[in-house]
């Protein structure tokens, strides 16, 4: 009887112990690790089939700024895809670096505005500048799920064939701009093979 109780207690405690072990592991990774080193199963694969409608009311020079789809990313030119939101503090911090990336890389940057209000998104771009050739919206977050986005901001480099060659989790920093994004973009422009995840 006592042996049976111990056996049942062991089965009850096993899931708890597994949960605590996994929670400890993830907690340690979040606190001590670099979030940009999180792996992506999409590296080297085609960008997910997604369509992002244009941000309502956003114009440049009196002309509406278009949205985009994954098909637009496979037209022979390297593209940077940036997921952002007006309510995201790190997005504010990285925005000047997106403008610098736009000026220095010579590639189009397209933005995906995530779970945001159109007027808030337009105010954000009006205040901080517009590095984007196109701005699509993801009001329900479904596109972000398809792209495997963990949180705002995240940035992808897509080669001219529509394949994801790099993923950057978290805000771009001066160091990641110089040491990761710009070199990956240059390799993608030269037609190099897909880059490994950030290290």
Image (spheres, grey):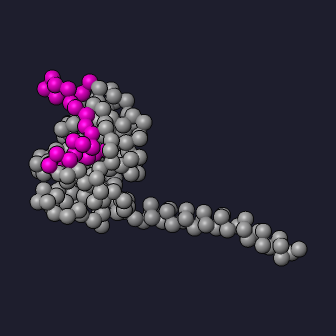
> Which residue is at the front of the view, 42 or 13?
42
Where is residue 152 drawn, in percent x and y?
36, 46
The vertical placement of 49 against 35, above or below, is: above
Q: Is residue 183 visible?
A: no
Identify whether 170 is placed above or below 124: below
Residue at image point 24% right, 63% down: 195
Res. 189 visible in picture: yes
Please indicate whether residue 162 sits to the left or right of residue 144 in the image: left
x then y, percent, for residue 155: 28, 50
Q: Is residue 42 left or right of residue 4?
A: left
Q: Position of residue 163 (x, y in %)?
A: 25, 54
**In the rendered image of this protein, does residue 56 appear above or below residue 67?**
above
Residue furthest right as drawn:
1
Q: Quadrant of the N terminus?
A: bottom right
Residue at image point 27% right, 65% down:
196
The residue located at (39%, 51%) in the rendering is: 148
Image spot of residue 68 (x, y percent): 25, 37
* Image-quadrant location for residue 38: bottom left
Q: Report if residue 83 lies within the magenta region.
A: yes
User: In the orientation shown, which residue stands out farthest toward the bottom?
Assistant: 3
Q: Quadrant of residue 10?
A: bottom right
Q: Which residues are magenta?
A: 57-85
- Name the residue at 33% across, 41% down: 50
């Amino acid at each position: 009887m006592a042996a049976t109780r111990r056996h049942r207690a062991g089965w009850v405690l096993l899931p708890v112990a597994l949960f605590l072990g996994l929670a400890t592991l993830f907690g340690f990774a979040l606190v001590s690790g670099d979030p940009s080193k999180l792996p992506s199963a999409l590296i080297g694969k085609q960008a997910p089939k997604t369509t992002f409608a244009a941000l309502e009311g956003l114009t440049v020079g009196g002309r509406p700024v278009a949205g985009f789809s994954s098909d637009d990313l496979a037209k022979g030119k390297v593209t940077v895809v940036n997921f952002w939101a007006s309510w995201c503090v790190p997005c504010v911090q990285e925005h000047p670096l997106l403008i610098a990336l736009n000026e220095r890389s010579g590639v189009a940057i397209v933005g995906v505005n995530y779970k945001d209000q159109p007027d808030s998104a337009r105010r954000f771009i009006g205040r901080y500048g517009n590095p984007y050739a196109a701005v699509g919206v993801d009001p329900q977050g479904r596109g972000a799920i398809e792209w495997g986005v963990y949180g705002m901001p995240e940035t992808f480099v897509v080669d001219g064939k529509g394949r994801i060659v790099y993923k950057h989790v978290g805000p771009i920093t001066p160091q990641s701009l110089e040491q990761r994004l710009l070199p990956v973009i240059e390799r993608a422009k030269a037609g190099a093979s897909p880059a490994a995840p950030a290290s």
